[in-house]
Structures are given as structure tokens and as C-alpha cells.
Amino acid sequence: MCDLFAEYREQGVNEKLLKEIETFRAGHAVDQKVQNRVMRPDIRFYGKEIFEMAATALLEGQNILLSGAKATGKNVLAENLAWVFGRPVYNISFHVNTDSSSLIGTDTFRNNEVCLRPGPVYDCAVYGGFGILDEINMAKNDAVSVLHAALDFRRILDVPGYEKIELHDAARFIGTMNYGYAGTRELNEALVSRFLVIDMPPIEEETLFRILKDLFPDAKDAGLKQICGFFMDLQLKASHNEITTKALDLRGLIGAIRTIRAGLSPIQALAMGIVNKSFDAFEREIIGDIVETRIPEGWSSADIF
Ligand SMILES: Nc1ncnc2c1ncn2[C@@H]1O[C@H](COP(=O)(O)OP(=O)(O)OP(=O)(O)O)[C@@H](O)[C@H]1O
Ligand SMILES: [Mg+2]
């Protein structure tokens, strides 16, 4: 049984759903060749309802698209799902130069013969992997159109110049997309219609506290709570468009707390992790004020750790 089951049970995830995932696992053995791709994620995902929606859709053979603001746990969720379902992971990052051959495969010479060097989508289809199509909206539409038949009820991958292959029963695709980043595009309708879409909610204070406590078990609760409150203030201001989302950076916050643990003062650390992420002097001032209202100037590392 998967070691994360207990965690999800504790979060209150539907027992029947967990049983069905177990049945899925038991019914789909993983090929020895790709066993090393079945990876335990570093971070557990918090969010019972989102987890239930995603897992139910996957059990029903659907592909899912996780859309949301940055650092809402899209990749954390995708990796947690792959681990809970016991499947090998294929992480495929999309960018403007992604083309169909980088997804499916390219011709190569072996023993004086042209043959296919399989790409990640091909391997995912063959071994029944969970393919994480990361930032799928960064790619050009014609690059992803090769995935259409793989993503809908046909479940086939047409490899140009080779045979069509049928997808392994356990193969699923999880797209992630972020709105708001520069360079992101709208996904075209044909592609979106092949996914069930989950809109990732903004982080709640209690969840944030649990995430930080997991990462920093040695931190003082009172100090961490102040930091959580600070982040919630930022989120609120961003939702009212008083500041942009540049500074609303959970990764930056986590990085800042690491440097507090290493001895920096909270003010110094938050300057690097959050405030300076904005390159607009006026906005930096607003964010600096938010820091001041939550974090006393005299605080040192010892007030948090
Ligand atoms: N619901 C959550 N459960 C667990 N961790 C979370 C959650 N939401 C955010 N995080 C934290 O946010 C960090 C970033 O998560 P992740 O990389 O999955 O975000 P993302 O949504 O893919 O962001 P981006 O759009 O920038 O790629 C993680 O390190 C994790 O600590
Ligand atoms: Mg991501």
C-alpha cells in the first residue's frame, strides 16, 4: 500500500476512493525497466477536495488540466497523484520550441538502420505512465495537436513514419498551466476539451501554516504564524490588484525562511525572497509596508527559530 494513503485518510479523503485507487494499483503492475520512475514526492499535497476531484477523474480514465496562479501546488499535486496511483512519471516541460518530435520521438541510426528514439510521450504511452505536461500553454498549437488522438477516447499515438500505438491502460496525462506569466498563451479549445479542468484555489492560511511546519518543524509556531499572516496580506492585496503577483511568491517565501534559519533577520530575508521580486519602486514600498505591519523590525532569526 502507498505510504501516502494514511496522510490522505487523515485529510479526510473519501475511503471508497482510496480503495478504488488501491484496486487500480493492484491491477496495473509497473514494468521493471521503468521502476525508477515511480518516485515518492518530497512534498505532500494539501487539499482534500482538489485531490478527490483529480483522483476520481483519473480513475475514470480522464486526463486532467490543473490551472491556477503560480505556486498553488499544481506540480506537487501531479507528482502526488502519480505516486499514489503507483505510476512512473514522465515530466515534459513545454516551451515555444517544443515540437512534435520532442514529444513523440526522433529518427536515429542504430546498426545502420533508421529507427525511432522514443520521446517521453511515447514512453509514457507504452509503460502506462503519468505524463505531466508542464506549462502546456507555453507550446505552439501545432506541436500539441499530435497529442489529440492520445488524449481523447481513441487513446492512440500516431507516430509519423511508424505504426500507431495504443496507449497502455494506465497511461494518463496531467497538464499544468499558469495564467498570468509573461509568454503564456490561451490553450485552444480542441485541446482543452480533452481534459477535465481543475481550477487550483489560492492557498488558505491554515494550509500555508501546515506546509511551512512540514518544511520547518524546528520553527516556532508564533513566528511562523506571523509569516503566514504576512503572506495572506500579500495575497489579499494582489487579489484587489493593489499589487501585482510578482511578490506573491511562495517559493521565495520558503527560500527566505531558510535564510532566517541560517541566521538572517526576517526583514533581510523577506527583502530577498519577496520584496525585491518587484522591480517597481512604488510597489516595493507598498510591500515593504506590509512586511512592517506584520514583522517587528527588531526581530532576529531567534524569533522564528
Ligand atoms: N496545496 C498545497 N499542498 C502542498 N504544497 C503546496 C500547496 N500549494 C502550494 N504548495 C507549495 O508551493 C510550492 C510550489 O508548488 P508547485 O511547484 O506545485 O506550484 P505550481 O502551481 O506548479 O507553480 P508554477 O505555476 O509556478 O509552476 C511547493 O514547494 C509547495 O511547498
Ligand atoms: Mg509548476
Image (cartoon, grey):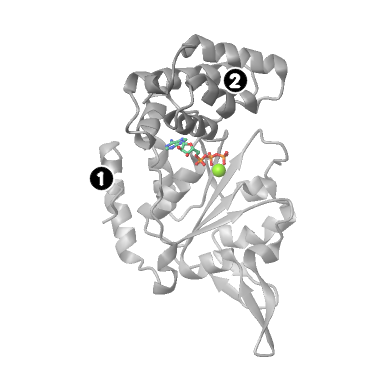
Q: Which residue is mark 2?
A: 238
Image point (56%, 45%), residue name = 176
What residue does disc 1 label?
Answer: 6
Whole-number angstrom distance, CA of label 2 to CA of label 1: 35 Å
Q: Amino acid at mark 2?
A: Ala
The relative height of residue 9 versus residue 281 in the rendered view (above or below) is below
The foreground one among 174 and 189 is 174
Q: Residue at coordinates 61% horizontally, 62% vertically from top-left?
A: 149
Q: Using residue 197 as the reference point, say whether residue 23 is left or right of it.
A: left
Tell me the amino acid under the disc marked 1.
Answer: Ala
Residue 267 placed where, x, y %? 52, 19
**Which residue occupies the foreground of this view, 87 or 153?**
87
Viewer-side residue, 288 vs 185: 288
Position above or below: 83 against 226: below
Q: Is residue 130 left or right of residue 56?
A: right
Q: Secondary structure at mark 2?
A: helix
Q: x, y percentage for residue 296? A: 46, 11
- The disc placed on residue 40 is none
